[in-house]
Image (spheres, helix red, strand yellow):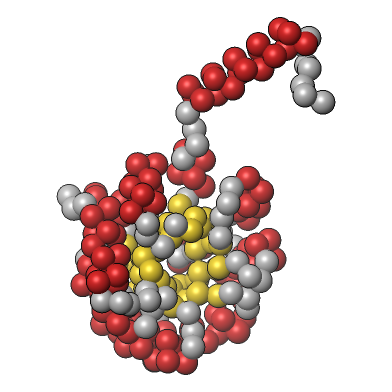
């Protein structure tokens, strides 16, 4: 499972890129709004941080398929590199995905709350489909189960589309999907930091240091 950063804060992206094995960055219009910066300015800065080969995902805003297609062309031309255009898996979006996939654009079908949206987006040619795990949980559903079902639909039908699970609020949701072998998960910085946060581990490491320095002196290391 690829791990992707779901954020547009360039300082956070820079730091997470230094520490974690991440494959790219996803954004959505709300995430870009939170940055308070001009969308293309921030997307280009993210591109310069992560390099041309890393995935960068940016979403179209238009309601009609024809306009979504035009936006997709503009996003890819303007930002460049390994660019994924996010298109909502609604009726107009599926129409746009069909056209864009045929043109060779890499599409992430987004705003997925139900397995059927994932299936249709895959058939239309999306590279990824992004089920919103935590938002589905908040509606009384089971986001992890929806993501797994979409993954199974792709596997059982020999489809190339991968699940890019999104909207996480805890480590357990991420772990269950990694365990299941889904394609990718995009995770906000606080949740990503939480994947590794464990006081008992810190305690164990501190004890090793204490024992070693009891033997060799304060501040000693294997150097
Ligand atoms: C990602 O592509 C989604 O837009 C995002 O993960 C939604 O996350 P949220 O539910 O935390 O807003």
The residue positioned 47% from the left and 38% from the top of the image is: 194
Q: With 39 as the anchor, is 140 left or right in this view?
A: left
Q: With 89 as the anchor, is 30 left or right in this view?
A: right
Quarter of the image with the N terminus in it: bottom left
Q: With 173 as the anchor, is 45 left or right in this view?
A: right
Q: Nearer the viewer, residue 206 or 62?
A: 206
Q: Is residue 170 above or below residue 126?
A: above
The residue positioned 36% from the left and 88% from the top of the image is: 98
The residue positioned 48% from the left and 79% from the top of the image is: 106
In the rendered image, residue 43, in percent from the top left (x then y), is placed at 60, 68
In the rendered image, residue 49, in percent from the top left (x then y), is placed at 68, 61
In the rendered image, residue 204, in percent from the top left (x then y), is placed at 54, 20
Quarter of the image with the C terminus in it: top right
What residue occupies the far right of the structure in this picture? 223
What residue occupies the far top of the structure in this picture? 214
Q: Is residue 161 visible?
A: yes
The residue positioned 65% from the left and 11% from the top of the image is: 211
Residue 210, by quadrant, is top right
In the rendered image, residue 11, in percent from the top left (x then y), is placed at 64, 50
Q: Nearer the viewer, residue 208 or 166?
A: 208
What residue occupies the far left of the structure in this picture? 140
Number of numbered callouts drawn: 0
Q: Is residue 67 visible?
A: no
């Amino acid at each position: 499972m690829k791990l992707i950063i779901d954020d547009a804060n360039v300082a956070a992206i820079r730091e997470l890129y230094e520490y974690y094995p991440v494959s790219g960055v996803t954004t959505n219009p709300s995430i870009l709004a939170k940055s308070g910066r001009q969308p293309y300015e921030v997307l280009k800065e993210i591109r310069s941080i992560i390099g041309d080969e890393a995935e960068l995902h940016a979403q179209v805003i238009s309601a009609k398929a024809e306009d979504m297609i035009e936006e997709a062309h503009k996003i890819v031309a303007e930002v460049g590199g390994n660019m994924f255009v996010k298109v909502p898996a609604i009726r107009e979006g599926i129409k746009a995905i069909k056209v864009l996939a045929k043109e060779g654009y890499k599409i992430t079908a987004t705003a997925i709350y139900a397995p059927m949206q994932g299936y249709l987006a895959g058939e239309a040619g999306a590279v990824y489909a992004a089920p919103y795990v935590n938002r589905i949980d908040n509606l009384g559903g089971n986001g992890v189960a929806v993501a797994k079902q979409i993954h199974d639909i792709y596997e059982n039908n020999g489809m190339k589309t991968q699940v890019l699970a999104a909207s996480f609020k805890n480590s357990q949701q991420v772990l269950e999907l990694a365990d299941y072998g889904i394609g990718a998960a995009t995770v906000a910085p606080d949740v990503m930091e939480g994947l590794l946060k464990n006081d008992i581990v810190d305690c164990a490491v501190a004890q090793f240091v204490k024992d070693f320095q009891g033997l060799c002196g304060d501040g000693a290391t294997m150097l």
